[in-house]
């Protein structure tokens, strides 16, 4: 397994023209925390896209935010990384985020599951 | 927050016609383990699709396998769930999987990051 210490590796660009570094979250050495949010959307946008953008910006401003990765096909997976459980609790209790969570249950999500995890080990290529 | 105990909830179908239950992994109560595999692909298939299908089937046969969720846009995220760290180690050391990991570094992945996590808490809608 190659080490993430390879200084040239993150200068590669993806087939989409973005730098790999901007796509795979550059988190510090473990331990840190991850929130895995797996969801199935309802049909239609209904304001979802705008709120997702707003929440992305807002999350990045939270104390203890370390990074985020997201992809969606039939199922959507967003993993956000945090310095502590306290940081995760503060983000969950953010007033604007609470509104988004409520709207999500009312309009945007067919179902979802949230998993709070402690990242104990990681490695990169 | 609605409880995952709602007996009617998982009977909903997604906009893609599949049952939500087959898309969001139905894991047992925590603690359990998650492997978050975040990757950026190289261009072209080069046998990737067939191997991904084979690895999905093979992982499901491993002792301690609890479920898997996967999505890819610019970045791909596959989260597999396991009963123990031992189960994760056994899967990583599987001979056919070792070959796939080697091929992945040679051909299929621009970059990736693997995070081994302990799921401490979860909740569903």
Image (cartoon, coloured by chain):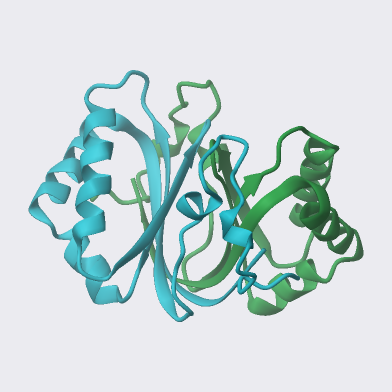
Chain colours: A green, B cyan
Residue A5 horizontal/vertical position (percent): 37, 50
Q: Where is residue A2 in the image (x, y as percent from the top left)?
A: 26, 48
| Above or below B121: residue B114 | above
**In this orientation, which residue lies closer to the viewer: A3 or B47?**
B47
The residue furthest left is: B95
What is the quadrant of residue B27 in the picture? Answer: bottom left
Is residue A108 rendered to the left or right of residue A35? right
**Does residue A4 show up?**
yes
The quadrant of the picture occupied by the N terminus of chain B is bottom right
Query: B42 or A42, which lies in front?
Result: A42
Q: At 62% across and 54% down in the image, what residue appears?
A: A67
Residue at 14 percent across and 60 percent down: it is B93
Does B3 sit left or right of A52 as displayed?
left
Tally the marks: 0
Residue B90 on image: x %, y %: 17, 66
Closer to the camera in the image, B54 or A97: B54
Q: Can residue B104 be seen in this view?
A: no
Q: Indicate left or right for B15 with B50 as reference.
A: right
The residue located at (38%, 60%) in the rendering is: B67
Q: In which quarter of the image is residue A101?
A: bottom right
Q: In this view, does B51 lie above or below A104?
A: above
The residue positioned 74% from the left and 75% from the top of the image is: A89
Q: In this view, does A13 lie to the left or right of A89?
A: left
Q: In this view, does B77 lie above or below B125?
A: above
Which x, y percent locates residue B91? 20, 61
Quarter occupied by the C terminus of chain B:
bottom right
């Amino acid at each position: 397994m190659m080490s993430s210490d390879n200084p040239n590796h993150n200068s590669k660009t993806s087939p989409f023209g973005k730098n790999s570094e901007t796509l795979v979250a550059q988190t510090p050495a473990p331990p840190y925390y991850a929130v895995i949010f797996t969801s199935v959307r309802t049909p239609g946008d209904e304001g979802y896209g705008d709120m997702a953008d707003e929440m992305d910006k807002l999350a990045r401003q939270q104390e203890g935010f370390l990074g985020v990765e997201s992809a969606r096909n039939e199922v959507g997976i967003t993993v956000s990384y945090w310095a502590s459980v306290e940081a995760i609790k503060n983000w969950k209790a953010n007033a604007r985020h609470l509104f988004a969570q409520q709207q999500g249950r009312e309009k945007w999500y067919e179902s979802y599951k949230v998993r709070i995890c402690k990242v104990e080990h990681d490695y990169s290529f």
